[in-house]
Image (cartoon, rainbow, N blue to C red):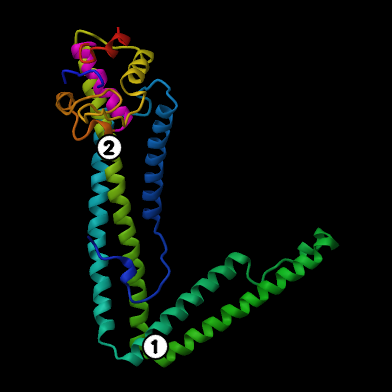
Amino acid sequence: MNCPPTRSAPSASSASLSVPSVPSVPLLFAMAAVVVISLFSLALSSEIAVGQPSNREGVPSLDEADVQLELAHTRNQRAQMRLIQVESAYFDTQDGLDILDAQQGDLLLRLADARSDAIALAVASYVGGGEAVKEVELLLGPGRASDISWRRHLVVAQAASVSESATSYNELAVEAGTELHQLAIDAQRAQVAYETGLAEAESAEQFLADVEQLHAIALAWHRSDIAVAEGRFGEAPASNWERLRMCEASGNYGAISKSGIYRGAYQFDRQTWKTVGGEGDPAAAPPLEQDARARELFARRGNAPWPVCGRFLP
């Protein structure tokens, strides 16, 4: 306070074969969960930034946070185990590639590229409608006839490209022989699985970190609830807290005093921060955590920890 208070996995980019990375369904769910938590954090930050009274809206109960944390740990453990498995399979296929001579290696890369191109073109053609452009579209009017004619030309050209790409791939497969052809397929599948597993593991780790932060906030509010129930001073209105934050730190949750001793919106020193359950730097804690710990401090000790700005609290 301005007034002293009394308180490594290898990167997937190293893979030898260039193949498309296709996110799995679990990865998409994990990514969505991270987005939800990120939006939650952003919303809280935005609320504080415009100087609105802080509240605990959106903070789960401690029991709910415990369940979320357990699920996040389980997801992370499974993702890490899955990564170990696919990583082992990936490097096994890489060992098989290392024993190939230069000519076989070149053929294998050409085969992998041809297979990727064929798959990509086939998917694009399917999404684009293939050759099945309905004649009924001509009923849309003469003004659209030229557009439809051009579309049909592109679709037919695309179908020809798919056929040509598939033919090229089949010719290379015959040239490579059954064993080398299968090795190319296995290597490509192993790389896709490895890249997907790596992305899933990274996503699970980030999700766990976000849930851990949310759990810390839930725990801080749980402690403050107990303090309000047991303490002598009860609870101050949100508008009073807003005035105190403006007095102490101009409403800035990342504020640090010139001496470096007092930190955050409530200008905690580190020792007092620890007495209300805080860890690390008060100024680096999320706004909702700072709010909860200040609430606990007031419930137990009143406005005494803020000798000057405490006048804004009852």
Residue annotated with mark 1: 107
Whether residue 300 is in magenta: the answer is yes
Dot 1: within a 10 Å radius of its alpha carbon, few (fewer than 14), some, or many (20 or more) residues?
some
Q: Earlier in the sequence, mark 2 or mark 1?
A: 1
Which stretch did the figure color magenta?
286-303
Residue annotated with mark 2: 213
Give the secondary structure at mark 2.
helix
Looking at the image, which residue is at 32% across and 66% down?
12
Disc 2 + disc 1, Cβ < 8 Å = no
Is residue 228 shown above or below 182? Answer: above
Q: Where residue 149 sits in the image (x, y, percent)?
A: 76, 70
Q: Where residue 243 sits in the image (x, y, percent)?
A: 36, 15
| Viewer-side residue, 272 vs 309 | 309
Query: Which secondary structure class fits the magenta region best?
Result: helix
Identify which amino acid the numbered label 2 is placed on.
Gln
Q: Quadrant of the N terminus?
A: top left
Give the secondary structure at mark 1.
helix
Identify which amino acid the numbered label 1 is placed on.
Leu
Whether residue 80 is in magenta: the answer is no
Q: Where residue 281 sits in the image (x, y, percent)?
A: 22, 34
